[in-house]
Amino acid sequence: MSSPSQALFTLLCAATLLSGCKEKPADGPSQDRTLEKLRMEVDRVNKGGAPSAPPDAPANPHAQLADLAAAQESDAVKTLVLASRQAVRVDTLELQPSGLESMHSLRGAGKVALTTSDLFVRVKLEARNTGTKAVDVPLSAAKLVDAEGQEYPIPRDAQAVGGTRRLDHTWEPGQSESLALVFEVPLAAVTPGLVLVFPSRGGQDTRLPLQ
């Protein structure tokens, strides 16, 4: 028997003996109810449940406020200021930044969610093929690069939950689409010098300043 179970069992035995010592208990129904609660608690702990706090244990309002603040912080989406809204080109695909966000939690459809102690960074883009021919651009190869040169590729699980699912496809002339790219980076990476890089197949990589 585990320590929590032993403590509850001891308490149950003590309560049982106490009730048996009194010939005419003034509050028999109350004692019966207490004993029943103790029996239920022993059964629950024996099945693997965590011991409950005593009913008269003082609540810690500071801890409750801290837990609430932490929950709100983890769910909060913070809007970041873009360093530039100037469009860049990957081949004939024009990519214009429209938003930049950071958060600790990503929530998708239904109950799907991801949480990180680092940061999820979501880059929103407006894409349009300005050329006269179809173009194939593998946007899934995009990566964030911080001021120290550390690279952060797109994590597939985070992208599936909080970003555009289909990034690699052929863009027909004039075709446009709103996109969201999701990355996971340390907090220290979201500083001036953070850029979004689109690798080139042969020429120079396309760089989009974010911070």
Image (cartoon, rainbow, N blue to C red):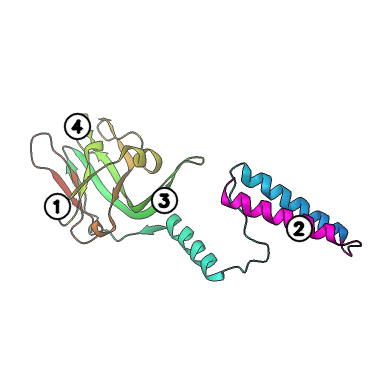
Q: Do labels 2 and 4 touch, CB within 8 Å?
A: no
Q: Quadrant of the C terminus?
A: bottom left
- The CA distance from mark 2 to mark 4 is 86 Å
Front disc: 2 or 3: 2
In reply to whether residue 2 is colored magenta, the answer given is yes
The numbered dot on residue 132 is 4
Residue 89, image x and y in percent? Answer: 18, 43
Residue drawn at x 47%, y 41% is: 112
Nearest the viewer among 5 and 210 is 5
* Sequence order check, earlier mark of 1 and 3: 3
Whichever of callouts 2 and 4 sits on the residue coming sooner in the sequence is: 2
Q: Amino acid at mark 1?
A: Gly
Are the residues flagged by discs 1 and 2 in contact, CB closer than 8 Å? Answer: no
What's under tag 2, amino acid-wise? Answer: Ala
- Reading the image, the residue beneath label 2 is 15
Residue marked by disc 1: 149
Using a 10 Å C-alpha cutoff, classify the residue at mark 2 as few (fewer than 14 neighbours), some (14 to 19) or many (20 or more). Answer: some
Which contiguous range is marked in magenta?
1-27
x and y, in percent, of residue 17 in the image? 78, 57
